[in-house]
Image: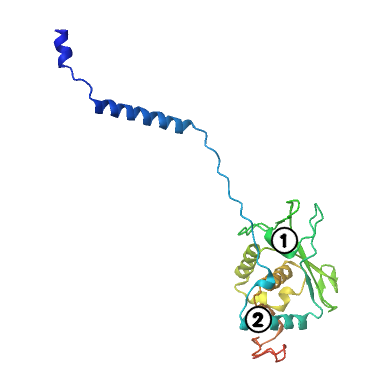
Amino acid sequence: SIDMISELSPVPSESSKSKKSIKTTMKSSLNRRMFRKVKPRRRKVSNTTLTKKKNLATSNAITKQIELGESLLESLYPGIVIDTESDSCPKCAQVLSNDEIIVGWTPCASKEYQTTCPSCKNKFVPKFSVSCKNPEFVGSQGKGTTLFCDYLSPWVLLREIRGVMNASGGFDKILDEKFRSGSDINATLWWNMIVTFDRFKLPYIFLLQGSFKNQLILPSPTLNESSNDVYI
């Protein structure tokens, strides 16, 4: 009879009801996650800090090499003035300091030649100038004039120098005095190395090797000795 069949039919246990409820809950939760609008993650913007040049620490040996390099550079280019503090934003006309130009570069961007103005956020290619009292010095307008160079970030400079080295088969071409004697891209690269090394207190005496034929420039043993000491 129907009553007997009903009595013989299995009655759902409490555990099976619980499992069914859990499955329904999980399915409902999964559906909500699938159709929930995902909010875009915000990138954390970190305030870039730059250690001032005067606060960079160097050993006595490095300091001697830096001072000798500065003296030799002065002997090659009497009255030399490298100005990295006078470039202004072409949009808002604010004059940027050297550190502001550096902070405005995009880190690790080897193909980005622009810096960002801290005032109006305009991007532009910064410049610096090199001048000296030597009438034979070749500037942007010929002999005896000021040389204006694009100010390159360390990442761009590294890429450009590697390109020169790969094309010439080494670093010798860069050390050659002729490499920096004009007002072209080679001079821009060479003076950028001087500016970058000077800003971060790195010795650049080796870059002057091409001006001392058949001689190896070594640091003077003491600062009391002549700054023009060149050892074979």
Which amino acid is tagged 2?
Answer: Thr
Characterize the local packing of mark 2: few (<14), some (14-19) or many (20 or more) Cα atoms within 10 angstroms. Answer: some
Q: Residue 63 bears which disc, if any?
A: 2
Q: Where is residue 58, by image quadrant?
A: bottom right
In the image, taking residue 24 as reference, residue 160 lies left or right, namely right
The residue drawn where x is 63% and y is 71% is: 168
The residue drawn where x is 81% and y is 70% is: 139
Q: CA distance from mark 1 to mark 2?
A: 25 Å
The residue labelled by disc 1 is 100
Q: Where is residue 61, by image quadrant?
A: bottom right
Q: Quadrant of the N terminus?
A: top left
Whole-percent x, y for residue 221 in the image:
64, 90
In the image, taking residue 47 as reference, residue 139 lies left or right, namely right
**Upstream in sequence: badge 1 or badge 2:** 2
Tell me if residue 147 comes above or below residue 120 in the rendering.
below
Front residue of 126 and 23: 23
Whole-percent x, y for residue 42 in the image:
58, 45
Which amino acid is tagged 1?
Answer: Glu
Q: Residue 75 bears which disc, if any?
A: none
Tell me if residue 11 comes above or below residue 149 in the rendering.
above
